[in-house]
Image: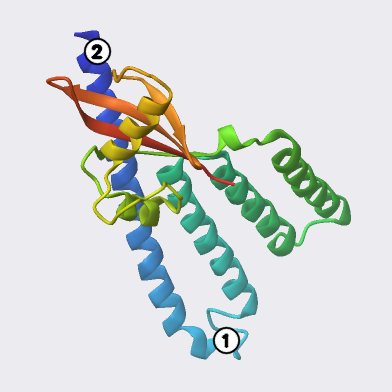
Amino acid sequence: MKKYITMFLSYLAMFLEFFISMMLAVGIILLCIRLAGSLVHIPDLDVYPNYEDLLESCFELIIGVELIRMMYYHTPDTVFEVLVFAIARQIINGHSSALSSLIGVCAIAVLFATRKFLFCGFDLLEKNIFRASSRIQVINKLMACHIPCPSPSSTLNDAILEKMSEENVTPEVGTCVSVADVALRIDKMKDGKISRIEVIHAIH
């Protein structure tokens, strides 16, 4: 029972994230259209949007777009980009003191240092589950990876079985092998045959 409740909550959280992302995307599109229609008023400083309004609105829209990416990709890199844009917006549009601006610049420097020295390839992973019969050519295009593809009809099942045969590994759920720049993990089996394969690709 606990397993099913956990699975239900997981799918519910995914649905809510998707729904919130859709609402945010629709809102951003409508605001972009409104902003684009108001550009003719920029020369008049007394009418919205003047230059400062335009700058602030653009930063807020960019932060909104990055928030959508953060909810979709779930990687440290997207969190980093949201924080950088938020701090940069505060420095540029905040009209704060020199000390506050200096603190903001230092915060951005710390973020870049953290990204360079503390992030590693294993922190930034793209994981997707595909049918074992999926064509390798399609997967390579979708995930920008380089799984060997001997022929146009080659499938993920062919690739993982060939690699497991080379390494004398028995196919079972959870078994993982490295192929080129990805890892292939058996996610599901049915009647002794592989039905689902998880493709794990490091994002650099």
Disc 2 vs disc 1: which is toward the camera? Answer: 2
Camera-nearest residue between 34 and 108: 108
Residue occupied by mark 1: 42
Relative image position of residue 17 (x, y in whole percent): 34, 41
User: Which type of secondary structure does the marked residue at label 2 adopt?
Assistant: helix
Q: Quadrant of the N terminus?
A: top left
Local packing at callout 1 (Cα closer than 10 Å; few below 14, some 14-19, many 20+) is some
Residue drawn at the location 45% of the way across and 81% of the way down:
36
**Mark 2, other Cα within 10 Å: few <14 / some 14–19 / many ≥20:** few
Q: Is residue 171 above or below residue 50?
A: above
Q: Secondary structure at mark 1?
A: loop
User: How far is disc 2 from disc 1 in space, using C-alphas?
Assistant: 57 Å
Q: Position of residue 79 (x, y in %)?
A: 57, 43
Q: Which mark is residue 3?
A: 2
Amino acid type of the residue tagged 2 in the rendering? Lys
The residue lying toward the viewer, choosing from 97 and 20, is: 20
User: Which one is nearer the viewer's eye here, 30 or 109?
Assistant: 109
| Disc sitting over residue 150 in the figure | none
